[in-house]
Each structure stands twice: as structure tokens, then as C-alpha cells.
Image: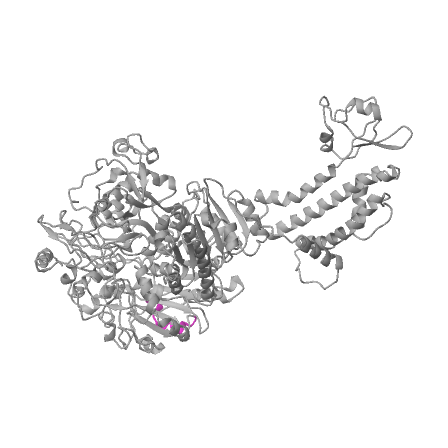
């Protein structure tokens, strides 16, 4: 429509027909501007109407509907969110308000401009007035502000009618938007002013909201063909979703062709909505509840690959939160029983309720990630190998590599942080090789660290073997657990070919070759043509051939989910030194089978360990040169070789599963210590647990902390005494789950009392753990960790009188009598004897060295001076990640720094439950990762054990039988010192790769990281005593003498055989059993050991 003024001065309108030969159509004119002027009829403008139209009608003015383009400003906020420019709630809201206000203002001005310049149609366009667009903008602003000067006003009926309706909405918008915009810009308190009644500002928006009351996220999910999707529900907040997406969609994973559908009954706020928009290609949100079957149908739960349920880690009532998630599981399983569910649980005891759901099946991938179990398990393992909690947390979290050029501790720490845990099938080139040989080949040639394997038996049961040793040989379809920087590197283990890649030195060149036949995966197996083994090992004669139905010659470890393997179908044979084949028992009971750690027996050459080393270094076997053809003896024979750990059917020393040390239940009064009693009690090398809580605090489940420290793969004398310092009212509530564990004492008091801390000799402890059960009862996030932070700073500021001296105590081999009694009932207070004077012991978290054969070790220690609380090894639990800045006063961490980049976390002195969020996505992509983590940190908890705890809420004692004693033979994490012993020559400038190969070949010990002094690279005399974690260093990484090596040690059956020989002859046998004192020890002579074994074989009856 063209509106023009004729020669007589009147306004006329005329429809414009389109013409193919015109340079620009009428629609093009609408897109170019608000007004086009033609000066003379005979002159054509390049962007104007065609010459024939202007000549015929004499157009002098033109108006269109191009003002509607101002409505596009409403999308301005979304555009900025897509570009990741707007992130905070205030910025998003401010841009939204401004764009809506300006867009409405400009669009309304354009309409007034159109109708006022054209006039009313029923008046034959005679009542028009000439107004410029900016005059109309001025008119709308004056109208919205209720000023109304009257200098410009609408004359047409259409204009006045529009103004009537516009005032209703525009005035309300002006009255509500403008103050809020000023508020956001000025950052003043929203509720700081006085009340004023504004009907338009309050009522009109509410009326509009009621009229337009439809759900923004009320649609249904349309699945994409060939693309899987998962449903995420539960606690959906900005923090939980951002942490989940950051790990789930990490670039280090393979291409994630999975769409994430969030379902929540509350619509997202602006910040969460902006997060969804930034990931709009892979994320969708729908408003609804998983308790409503209709909403489950909307998100296509029946076709979903899995359903993930997030928990609120910071809720005040953990049991209520767990109950809510259990109800979600019930609803989802009721709608679709076969859907795979991965849920977070807060309390360990609530996991038992999931077993009551008929369709809950861990064999089909259902998993419950208990945050309390894993959190306390991580902290407990740090008491045995400090820094392990940080290393494991970084391994299952996806971190991008951050390169630092400066030679600082952050450089080496971040290089290790970029490593993650992956699984991949092993190439057929590895078939027939033992685990240590494959592990060495992967590390040296493929630059991969293999730590465990998984295979499936004839019964299709998956079993996970951690550092199984050289008696296990690979078969087709073996799945390996690797530590690597990304998933592409792990593919080398699958593509490796002896014929094609044997001479390749650059691992990046190892690609899929053409000489192999196509591999087909079927039920976890890789079908391929076997190739000749890469390496031949003359001393690896016994094999584990699972693909042919042969089970292990000894009890196996737990399977993929922690359950135990079914019985083997046939008898098995084991090869001995003489080549004789002994017939094994047909089967051990099905319930509790674990794969024993690999260990070879010694011959003529011997080495010895100090008691401290035997505890912290995992009691490695005593001879680096064992007979090549002697396989590790069956665990049935081991008890007869150990008089101290003898198989006594009349004494219950372990629980019914054989996985944990056990003692008869005790009343809490028997383990209570008064302050004076504790002061007269010799405590050294123990674990002090400072716990905050009261009668109303939610239980944190301290049993999950004690169980890893009471695992049966420790000998009794190696167990660290645990002393709880806290409220008696709270500890009475926890005691029901602790009364069957030995070597546990309680000092009623407060961790903030220095008198209580001195009474328990905190300066002589191996580790101090600070926990709190009151953290979630505080609304202010910055104050949630106040008790833990105050306790940590209080301990660090304490000073102690080193009256005897650590070196003197170490050289004397001083161990208080009473600490070494084999039964806790022999002591007035749980294995402790009151002394008239206080003695100091060794507070050495650093592991003592291995003894070189024939060499007396000097009394050397890298332990810092214990006269100051800053030298006490401690780990503090935090709820709020940002509070980590208050733990170390000498660090320079920025408050906005991520937790894993801070110094306390890198040093292993702080742990937050938020790091466990990554386990949700890690478990979805590979449920074996969760099994491996549980095996490492829980000490051997299995679904069977969880069922027993659900029945009785306590461990049940069991008699020592061959079956239960066999379960003690399993791998554990330890730390190895380099400043002396067999690896001392490598500790001073040697390569980490040489240490890795030597430890693996000689001791079947698998190294996977370093715990290094923070300033070790400065080579200064006054170094900081803090250490940090280096995960999976490269082969050429240079070692220093003060390094501690993280390693997977085998169980040593002979560590408890003769404790008298572990100390100097001038001391009693009692003093030798103290696991936390440091001694120099003579080399033990074990020439008669093989003779005893031969005699034992003849006397052993196999059933």
C-alpha cells in the first residue's frame, strides 16, 4: 500500500503491484528504512519505487510496517546468552528488561507514526497529521511516564484508540521495569525501600500472567533417530547441572552423541535457563515430576538409555533426601522396570532400601553412588597414603590440560591432573602374556598405565582384578583399566600389533593396521585371530584361561559390581617347583571369593622391612629374586605357616566375610578415655579424628571411615589406633556401628580444646582428620565450614615440647607395651596400657625405606620437626569449595579458583564432597570405574556385606576358615620412600620409568604416582614440608631422594609371622609390633622358609 499526496494536496492510497523487472520489490523497501522520500516525479532513486509508479502517482512520502523489526530486540538477551556473554542472573535480567522495554517503546511509536501520517480509512485519510518518527517516540515516552505535556498528541481515531490500550500496558511496564532496571544498575536492596501501592504496576502484570498461563517447558521430547538420550532428575540447580554438564560433555571424551533431558517440577531460573541455552544442541529441559507417569511419558523414559538422579548434598536432613530419591527410583522402575538407573545417595545405610525394589538389578547397570561411603573412604585411604584422595578424585574427573611454562610445583601437578581413568579392550597381541609383562609394555611402548583388568567367565560374571600379578595371563576379550590423558590414547592398547608396531618408537603412530582381521564385539569379548605373544617369559608358566572355562587357581576378586563369583565347574591344577600338579579343591563357597594378590616366595636372597615400612609400604615380599617357576602358594596353606595369624576355629578375629578385622561388641564405656587417662596413655602413630556433632546432628556414618582402616589385608599389629575426639552424645549414636572394630577409643570433649588435643598426643599422630556433622544446618554457605576451619587453624598454631626427640625415639625402637597386644581385651582401655610418664613416638606419615640385603639401615628421616602444629599431617573435610582459601595462610590461591587448582587440595590436606559429582557421568559411560573406585577405597565392601549390614546394622563375627582367610589376600595402596633401600640409587636423579619397571619386575609392585615436597625443585636446604601429588609421571621424569611413591602392593602373609625379628634384639617383642615407629632393622635370615613350605604341602589336605 502506497500513501501519497496528490497535486491538489489531498492524500491518496494505492496498492502497488509487484514487477519482476523492478530492481527492488515493495518488501525490499520495507526492510530498508522507515521512510522514503521522492523529490521529483521524473527522478528515480536507486532504492525507491520503479520509475513508472513515481511518475504516475507523484509519491512524496511512503510509510510501511517496518517498525515491527524493533520486536527483534526482544531476542537480544538470548543472543548474548548463546555467545556466553551473559552468565549471571542480574545481567540476564537487566538485558531482558531493557530489551523488552525498548522494543515495546519503539514498536508502539512506529504504529502511531503509521496511523497518524496516513489517517483513518473511514475519513478517506483526511484527518492525518505529519509527525516524524522521533516525535512519536517522544509522545510514547511522555504518555508512559504519565506526564502528558500535550504538545504532541494523536488526532486520528486509530491513534487515540491505540493509546487507550497502550496506556494500560505501557504505564504498568514503565512503572515496574524502570525502577527494577535502576535497581539492578544501582545494586540497591530490593526490599530496602518503603511500600507504595501502584495498581497498574502490580495488578496488570499479574493479570497478564494469569491470562497467558501456559507452561514454557510443557512439551514432549521428540527423540532423534540414531541418537540416545538420558533423563536427569532430582536436585536440579545451577550448581549441580553445571558440574554435571562440565564433566559429561568434556572434550576429552569421545564424541558424546547423547542428548540430555532434564526433568524437574520447578521451572529454571534465569541463570540455569541461560546454561541450557548455551548447550541447546545437547540439552533440553521439561517441567514435570518423575512421580507422574504422564511426565515420564513426555520425556520418553521407556526409550532412554539411562536415568540419572542427583541428590542435594547440602540438605539439612540427609535421610529425607535419600527417601525422596528412593521414591523417584520406585516411580521410574514402576513405569519401566528395565530402565537403567544411577542415583546418588547420601547415607550408607539407606542403600539397603534399594534392594527392596524388585526390579533393581545391579547386573543390568543399576548403581547407587553413596557420597558418605566414598567421601569417608577417600579420607580413610589418605590416612594410609596421604594425598591418595586427591589423586583418585582427579582420576575420575575430566580435567583439561593447563600448560605452565614456569618450573613450579603447579606445572607438575597439572600435568598429572590431566590424566583420567579409561577402559579399553586389549589387543590380541597380548594374549598369553602375564599382567606385569603387559603392564610394562603398555607403559614403556604405548605410554599407557594399566592398573587392572576385567574379564567374563563362563557364567558371564564379570570380575575385576587389580594388579593381579604374573600368575594371570591374558585371554581374548580382556578389558583393561588405563590411566591416560584422553580416550584416543587408550586406543593404542586395542590397535597394537606385534608385526606392525614392534619397531615404532612414537606411540602416536600406533594406528589400526590392516593385517588384523575385523574384530567383532560380542557380549564383552573381542573376536579376533590370536597373534604370537610379543614377549616370552620363561618364569610365567601358569596361566589363567577364562575363555575356556578355567577359573582362577585361587579365590577371585569381586565382580563388576562388587558381588562375588560363582563356583568353578571343575577342579583346577597349580604348578609347583617340582613340576608336580596338585589337585585343588573343587570349589570354595560362592559367597566370598577374592583374587589373591600376586606374590612369589623367597629363596636364598632376602631383604627386610621395618615395621613402619611393612605398614605403609604394603609389606612387599622379601626377596627380589624368587624362584621363577614357583607359583604363589595357595592361601589354604598360609595360615599354617603363620603361628601368630593361625587359623583358630575357636577365635573370631574377622567378620563373617573375612574382609575386615572384628572383635566382640563392646560397651562404649569400655573405650572411653578421660583427659587424664589419655595423657597417661602412650599414643603414637595413631589416627586422631576430630568430629563436630551433637545429639541433633545428622549421622555422617563414621563406620565408612573405620572400615578401610580395619581391612583384613592388614595384619593386626599394623592397624593404626583410632581415637575420636568429640561430643559423647553424638558418638554414642555412631557407636552402634563401631562396637565390633578393634583398636578404637573415644575422648569426650571438643576438637577446639587444646587440652584434649594434647591429651591424645596429636603431635605424634600419623594423621589428624577433621569432620563435621553440623555443616548442613547453616544457611550461610561461607559459614558451613567454620568449625572445621577453626579446628584446623587451632591445631596448626599449637606448639609442643619435644622432650625426648623423634630421632632418639626412633633409634631406640621405642614402642609402648600394651599397643602390641594381639587382643584388645588384654588392655584396660582397648589395647592400651596407662603409663606413669608420657613418651614420644614417631609421627612419620612418610614410609620407612626398604632394607638392602645385608645392610643395616641408618636412622634417617625426612620427617619435619614435630614441635609445631604446622607439621602435623591432617586432612579437613569441607562443604563449600571456596572456604579452602582459609586453610592455608601462606598460599596465594584466588577465592574464585576451582578446588582442584588450590594448594590444600593438591597437597591432599582438604577434601570436598563436590569432587564426587563427576562420578555420575563417569559411571554412566563406564560402570567399571565405580567398581574400581569402591574396591580401592572401601577396603572390600561387597553387595553381600551390604545385605548383612542391612539385616543387623553391624558386622557379624566369623571363624577363621580357609575361605575367610583367603579373602585377606588382596591388593592395597601404599607409599614407598626412596631415600634408602633397593631403590635408593634411583632416588637421586634416576628416572621414574626405571623405578616403575624395577618395582614391577622385582616385587610385582605397580607404581602410579609421586608424593613430592612442594619446593623439591628448588634444591634449597630450608624446604617447605608440604607435599603435592603427581599422577602417572612420564618415563623420563627425574626423581629426588625425598619422593614418596604411590604403589599397589601385594598382601604379605609373612609380615605377621615373627614380629620379634622386626626390632633390635635389645628390645622386647612388644616394641617390635608398633607399626608407626621407625626402626633400623637387621636383615632377617629365612633360609628354612622353603623347607617349611615343602613340609606344609605334604601335610595339607585338599578338599
Q: Is residue 844 visible?
A: no
Q: Measuring from the top left, give residue 112's x and y in whole percent.
A: 80, 42
Instruction: Name the one closer to the observer, 73 or 230.
Output: 230
Q: Measuring from the top left, give residue 659's x and y in whole percent.
A: 27, 62
Q: Quadrant of residue 812?
A: bottom left
| Vertical placement of residue 497 versus 479, above or below | above
| Lateral position of residue 1017 relative to residue 62, left or right | left
Q: Measuring from the top left, give residue 76's x and y in whole percent.
A: 64, 43
| Vertical placement of residue 946 versus 568, above or below | below
Queried whether the magenta region covers residue 753, the answer comes back as yes
Instruction: Name the one closer to the observer, 596 or 400.
Output: 596
Residue at x 29% of width, y 76% of height:
829
Q: Quadrant of residue 278?
A: top right
Q: Main secondary structure of the magenta part?
A: helix
Queried whether the magenta region covers residue 128, the answer comes back as no
Q: Quadrant of residue 555?
A: bottom left
Q: Read off the magenta span.
A: 752-765
Locate the C terminus by quadrant. Answer: bottom left
Instruction: Name the one closer to the observer, 403 or 630.
Output: 630
Instruction: Name the one closer to the observer, 241 or 376.
Output: 241
Q: How is the image coloured?
A: one colour
Residue at x 28% of width, y 67% of height:
841
Locate the N terminus by quadrant. Answer: top right
Q: Is residue 644 visible?
A: yes
Disc count in the image?
0
Q: Measuring from the top left, give residue 442's x and y in whole percent.
A: 29, 41
Amino acid at each position: 500500500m502506497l500513501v501519497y499526496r496528490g497535486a491538489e494536496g489531498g492524500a491518496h492510497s494505492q496498492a502497488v503491484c509487484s514487477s519482476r523487472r523492478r530492481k527492488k520489490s515493495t518488501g525490499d523497501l520495507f526492510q530498508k528504512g522507515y521512510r522514503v522520500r521522492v523529490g521529483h516525479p521524473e527522478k528515480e532513486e536507486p532504492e525507491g519505487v520503479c520509475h513508472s509508479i513515481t511518475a504516475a502517482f507523484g509519491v512524496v512520502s511512503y510509510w510501511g510496517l517496518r517498525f515491527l523489526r524493533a520486536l527483534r530486540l526482544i531476542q537480544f538477551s538470548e543472543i548474548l546468552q548463546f555467545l556466553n556473554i551473559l552468565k549471571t542472573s542480574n545481567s540476564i535480567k537487566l538485558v531482558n528488561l531493557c530489551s523488552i522495554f525498548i522494543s515495546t517503546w519503539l514498536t508502539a511509536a512506529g504504529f502511531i507514526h503509521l496511523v497518524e501520517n496516513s489517517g483513518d480509512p473511514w475519513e478517506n485519510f483526511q484527518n492525518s497529521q505529519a509527525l516524524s518518527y522521533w516525535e512519536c517516540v517522544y509522545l510514547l515516552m511522555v504518555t508512559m511516564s504519565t506526564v502528558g505535556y500535550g504538545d504532541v498528541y494523536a488526532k486520528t481515531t486509530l491513534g487515540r484508540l491505540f493509546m487507550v490500550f497502550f496506556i494500560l500496558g505501557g504505564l504498568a511496564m514503565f512503572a515496574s521495569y524502570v525502577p527494577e532496571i535502576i535497581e539492578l544498575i544501582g545494586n540497591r536492596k530490593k526490599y530496602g525501600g518503603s511500600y507504595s501501592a501502584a495498581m497498574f504496576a502490580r495488578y496488570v502484570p499479574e493479570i497478564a500472567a494469569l491470562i497467558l498461563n501456559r507452561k514454557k517447558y510443557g512439551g514432549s521430547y521428540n527423540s532423534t533417530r540414531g541418537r540416545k538420550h538420558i533423563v536427569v532428575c532430582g536436585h536440579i540447580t545451577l550448581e549441580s547441572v553445571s558440574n554435571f554438564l562440565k564433566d559429561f560433555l568434556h572434550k576429552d571424551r569421545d564424541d558424546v552423541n547423547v542428548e540430555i533431558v532434564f526433568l524437574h517440577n520447578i521451572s529454571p531460573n534465569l541463570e540455569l535457563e541461560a546454561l541450557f541455552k548455551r548447550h541447546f544442541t545437547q540439552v533440553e529441559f521439561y517441567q514435570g515430576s518423575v512421580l507422574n507417569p504422564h511426565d515420564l511419558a513426555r520425556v520418553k523414559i521407556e526409550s532412554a538409555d539411562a536415568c540419572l538422579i542427583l541428590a542435594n548434598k547440602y540438605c539439612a536432613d540427609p535421610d529425607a533426601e535419600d527417601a525422596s530419591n528412593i521414591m523417584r527410583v520406585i516411580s521410574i522402575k514402576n513405569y519401566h522396570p528395565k530402565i537403567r538407573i544411577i542415583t546418588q545417595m547420601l547415607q550408607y545405610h539407606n542403600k539397603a532400601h534399594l534392594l527392596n525394589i524388585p526390579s533393581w538389578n545391579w547386573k543390568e547397570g543399576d548403581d547407587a553412588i553413596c557420597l558418605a561411603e566414598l567421601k569417608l573412604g577417600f579420607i580413610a585411604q589418605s590416612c594410609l597414603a596421604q594425598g591418595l584422595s586427591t589423586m583418585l578424585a582427579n582420576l575420575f574427573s575430566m580435567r583439561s590440560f593447563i600448560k605452565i611454562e614456569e618450573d613450579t610445583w603447579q606445572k607438575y601437578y597439572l600435568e598429572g591432573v590431566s590424566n583420567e581413568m579409561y577402559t579399553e579392550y586389549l589387543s590380541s597381541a597380548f594374549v598369553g602374556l602375564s599382567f606385569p609383562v603387559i603392564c610394562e609394555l603398555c607403559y614403556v611402548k604405548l605410554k599407557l598405565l594399566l592398573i587392572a583388568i576385567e574379564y567374563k567367565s563362563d557364567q558371564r560374571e564379570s570380575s575385576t582384578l587389580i594388579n593381579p600379578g604374573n600368575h594371570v595371563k591374558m585371554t581374548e576379550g580382556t578389558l583393561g583399566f588405563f590411566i591416560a590423558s584422553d580416550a584416543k590414547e587408550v586406543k593404542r592398547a586395542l590397535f597394537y600389533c606385534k608385526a606392525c608396531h614392534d619397531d615404532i618408537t612414537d606411540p602416536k603412530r600406533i594406528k589400526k593396521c590392516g593385517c588384523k582381521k575385523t574384530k567383532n564385539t560380542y557380549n564383552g569379548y573381542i573376536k579376533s585371530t590370536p597373534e604370537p605373544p610379543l614377549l616370552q617369559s620363561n618364569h610365567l608358566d601358569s596361566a589363567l584361561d577364562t575363555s575356556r572355562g578355567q577359573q582362577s587357581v585361587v579365590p577371585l576378586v569381586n565382580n563388576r559390581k562388587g558381588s562375588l563369583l560363582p563356583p568353578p565347574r571343575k577342579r583346577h591344577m597349580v604348578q609347583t617347583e617340582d613340576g608336580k600338579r596338585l589337585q585343588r579343591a573343587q570349589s570354595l563357597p560362592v559367597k566370598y571369593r577374592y583374587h589373591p594378590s600376586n606374590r612369589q616366595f623367597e629363596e636364598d636372597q632376602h631383604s627386610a622391612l621395618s615395621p613402619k615400612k611393612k605398614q605403609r609400604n604394603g609389606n612387599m615380599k622379601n626377596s627380589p629374586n624368587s624362584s621363577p617357576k614357583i607359583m604363589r602358594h595357595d592361601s589354604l596353606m598360609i595360615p599354617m605357616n603363620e603361628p601368630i595369624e593361625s587359623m583358630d576355629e575357636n577365635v573370631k578375629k574377622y567378620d563373617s566375610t573375612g574382609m575386615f578385622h572384628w572383635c566382640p561388641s563392646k560397651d562404649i564405656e569400655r573405650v572411653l578415655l578421660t583427659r587424664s587417662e589419655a595423657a597417661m596413655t602412650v599414643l603414637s602413630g595413631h589416627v586422631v579424628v576430630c568430629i563436630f556433632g551433637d545429639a541433633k546432628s545428622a549421622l555422617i556414618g563414621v563406620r565408612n571411615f573405620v572400615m578401610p582402616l580395619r581391612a583384613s589385608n592388614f595384619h593386626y599389629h599394623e592397624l593404626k589406633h583410632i581415637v575420636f575426639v568429640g561430643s559423647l552424645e553424638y558418638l554414642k549414636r555412631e557407636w552402634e556401628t563401631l562396637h565390633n572394630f578393634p583398636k578404637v577409643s573415644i575422648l569426650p570433649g571438643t576438637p577446639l580444646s587444646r587440652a584434649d588435643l594434647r591429651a591424645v598426643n596429636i603431635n605424634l599422630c600419623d594423621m589428624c582428620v577433621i569432620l563435621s556433622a553440623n555443616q548442613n544446618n547453616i544457611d550461610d554457605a561461607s559459614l558451613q565450614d567454620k568449625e572445621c576451619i577453626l579446628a584446623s587453624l587451632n591445631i596448626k598454631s599449637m606448639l609442643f615440647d619435644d622432650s625426648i626427640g623423634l630421632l632418639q625415639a626412633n633409634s631406640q625402637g621405642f614402642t609402648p607395651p600394651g599397643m602390641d597386644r594381639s587382643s584388645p581385651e588384654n588392655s584396660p582401655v582397648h589395647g592400651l596400657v596407662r603409663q606413669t610418664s608420657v613418651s614420644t613416638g614417631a609421627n612419620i606419615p612418610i614410609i620407612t625405606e626398604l632394607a638392602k640385603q645385608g645392610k643395616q639401615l641408618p636412622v634417617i628421616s625426612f620427617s619435619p620437626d614435630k614441635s609445631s602444629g604446622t607439621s602435623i599431617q591432617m586432612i579437613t573435610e569441607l562443604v563449600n569449595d571456596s572456604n579452602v582459601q582459609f586453610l592455608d595462610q601462606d598460599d596465594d590461591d584466588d577465592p574464585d579458583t576451582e578446588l582442584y587448582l588450590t594448594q590444600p587440595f593438591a597437597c591432599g590436606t582438604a577434601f570436598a564432597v563436590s569432587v564426587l559429582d563427576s562420578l555420575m557421568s563417569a559411571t554412566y559411560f563406564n560402570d567399571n570405574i565405580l567398581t574400581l573406585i569402591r574396591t580401592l577405597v572401601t577396603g572390600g565392601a561387597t553387595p553381600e556385606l551390604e545385605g548383612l549390614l542391612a539385616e543387623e546394622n553391624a558386622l557379624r563375627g566369623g571363624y577363621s576358615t580357609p575361605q575367610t582367610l583367603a579373602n585377606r589376600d588382596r591388593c592395597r595402596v601404599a607409599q614407598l620412600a626412596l631415600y634408602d633401600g633397593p631403590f635408593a640409587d634411583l632416588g637421586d636423579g634416576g628416572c621414574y620409568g626405571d623405578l616403575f619397571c624395577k618395582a614391577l619386575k622385582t616385587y610385582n609392585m605397580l607404581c602410579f604416582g609421586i608424593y613430592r615436597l612442594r619446593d623439591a625443585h628448588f634444591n634449597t636446604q630450608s624446604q617447605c614440608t608440604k607435599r603435592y601429588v603427581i599422577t602417572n609421571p612420564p618415563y623420563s621424569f627425574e626423581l629426588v631422594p625425598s619422593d614418596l611413591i604411590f604403589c599397589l602392593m601385594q598382601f604379605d602373609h609373612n609380615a605377621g609371622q615373627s614380629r620379634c625379628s622386626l626390632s633390635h634384639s635389645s628390645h622386647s617383642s612388644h616394641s617390635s609390633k608398633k607399626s608407626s615407629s621407625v626402626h633400623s632393622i637387621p636383615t632377617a635370615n629365612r633360609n628354612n622358609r622353603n623347607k617349611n613350605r615343602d613340609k606344609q604341602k605334604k601335610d595339607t589336605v585338599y578338599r
